Amino acid sequence: MTALAVIAVLLVLAVATTGLIQAQAAAGRARLAADLAALGGATAQSSLVSPGEACAVAQRVAEANGAVLTGCTVLGEDVTVRVAVSASVLGVGRTAAAAARAGPVERTG
């Protein structure tokens, strides 16, 4: 009987760990997509060779990385984006969200 209880506990721990890993992977994909979308938008915003509309470029980059652009703000040369990534955690649909900002470095002093 004790062996059965130990197996049950180990099974519960394995399922919980699997859920945490799936959630962490989705959050990582969201952060990556947000970072790349912000960089793409900022590059388009400040490009002299091939200028483009920052939020349109950010949307294309986010979609290319499996995310949906949920917000985009351009303030000067800074581009801030918010993205969402759909994920399945233990068979339940979830959404991982992230935000990122890109632009030139501000020099102080």
Image (tube, rainbow, N blue to C red):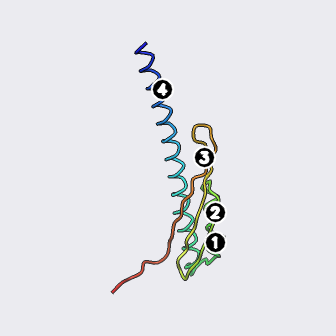
Pointers 4 and 2 in contact (CB under 8 A)? no
Q: Earlier in the sequence, mark 2 or mark 3?
A: 2
x 55%, y 55%: residue: 30
Q: Secondary structure at mark 2?
A: strand
- 100 left or right of 2? right
Q: Nearer the viewer, residue 90 or 72?
A: 90
Task: State the image coordinates of residue 16 (x, y, percent, origin top left).
Answer: 49, 35
Q: Nearer the viewer, mark 1 or mark 4?
A: 4
Label 2, label 3: how far apart the Cα atoms are: 15 Å
Q: Secondary structure at mark 3?
A: strand
- For the residue marked with disc 3, what is the amino acid? Ala
Q: Earlier in the sequence, mark 1 or mark 4?
A: 4
Q: SS class of the residue under badge 1? A: helix
Which of marks 1 and 3 precedes in the sequence? 1
Within-10-Å neighbours for mark 2: few <14, some 14–19, many 20+:
many
Whether label 2 touches label 1, CB < 8 Å: yes
- Tell me which label, 2 or 1, sits earlier in the chain: 1
Q: In the displayed structure, would residue 39 be above or below residue 33?
A: below
Q: Residue at the spot x=57%, y=57% of the render?
A: 97
Q: Residue at (51%, 66%) from the top-left corner? A: 100
Residue identified by numbered label 1: 55
Residue hosting label 4: 11
C-alpha gap between disc 4 and disc 2: 37 Å
| CB atoms of marks 2 and 3 within 8 Å | no
What distance separates the C-alpha of mark 1 from that of mark 4?
Answer: 46 Å
User: x%, y% of residue 103?
Assistant: 49, 75
Tell me the crowding category of disc 1: few under 14, some 14 to 19, or many 20 or more residues within 10 angstroms, Cα based.
Answer: many
**Residue type highlighted by circle 1:** Cys
State the residue position of label 2. Answer: 69
Q: Earlier in the sequence, mark 3 or mark 4?
A: 4
Mark nearer the N terminus (4 vs 2): 4
Q: Which residue position is annotated with label 3?
A: 87
